[in-house]
Image (cartoon, helix red, strand yellow):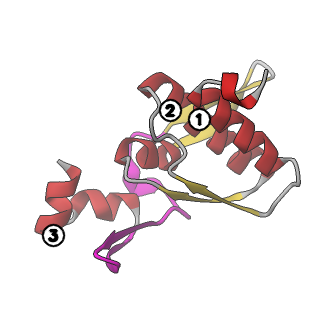
């Protein structure tokens, strides 16, 4: 297919394939699910998790979609019956090595774990999360 004939989700997957083809140590994802329906967005976040977990690639996700950020933070790949399938951690307080950074007007408003973000008493963060 020609690039103009691809759907938004297909374009995102092609972009991810191009990025991992060179076997990088770090991938920066800039709004990887913008404009996608929730099902396709979950497919993209699952691909990000696979690349992170199976290839050992450090992933930096820039997004205003908290749903997607939390999906990437909570999901890991688990081998079942010879296949890798996404599995989800319900308790955000057990996540290690995952850090959220929230900016407000170009300044760092929050830096910490997903659990600390969810438990923040900061009025701006509370409003953003709701």
Q: Residue 8 in the image: x percent, y percent? A: 57, 30
Residue with the most extreme right position: 22
Q: Which residues are magenta?
A: 89-112
Secondary structure, mark 1, is helix
What is the C-alpha distance between the residues marked 1 and 3? 30 Å
Nearer the camera: disc 1 or disc 3? 1
Callout 2–callout 1 Cβ contact below 8 Å: yes
Which residue corresponds to the image point at 34% horizontal and 71% vertical from the top-left? 103
Q: Which part of the image, by quadrant, shows the N terminus? A: top right
Point out residue 71 in the picture as x, y percentages from the top left corner: 46, 41
Query: Looking at the image, which residue is at 77% across and 44% down?
Result: 54
Task: State whether residue 97 appears in this view.
Answer: yes
In this rendering, position of residue 93 left or right of residue 14:
left
Q: Is residue 94 magenta?
A: yes
Whether residue 123 appears in magenta in the rendering, the answer is: no
Can I make out residue 121 in this image? no
Q: Which is nearer the eye, 84 or 50?
A: 50
Q: How many marks?
A: 3
Q: Say which element carries label 2.
A: helix
Q: Does 95 sit left or right of 19 as displayed?
A: left
Residue that carries the numbered disc 2 in the rendered image:
41
Q: Which residue is mark 1?
A: 44
Residue under circle 3? 122
- The residue at the far left in this view is 123
- Frontmost of labels 2 and 3 is 2
Q: Taking 42 as reference, is 113 left or right? A: left
């Amino acid at each position: 297919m020609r690039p103009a004939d691809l759907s938004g989700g297909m374009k995102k997957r092609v972009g991810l394939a191009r990025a991992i083809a060179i076997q990088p140590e770090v991938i920066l994802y800039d709004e990887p699910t913008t404009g996608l329906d929730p099902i396709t967005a979950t497919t993209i976040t699952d691909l990000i998790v696979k690349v992170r977990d199976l290839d050992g690639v450090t992933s930096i996700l820039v997004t205003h979609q908290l749903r997607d950020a939390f999906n990437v933070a909570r999901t890991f790949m688990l081998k079942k019956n010879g296949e890798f399938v996404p599995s989800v951690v319900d308790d955000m307080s057990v996540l290690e090595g995952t850090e959220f950074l929230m900016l407000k007007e170009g300044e760092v408003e929050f830096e910490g774990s997903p659990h600390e973000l969810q438990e923040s008493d900061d009025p701006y963060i509370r409003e953003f999360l709701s």
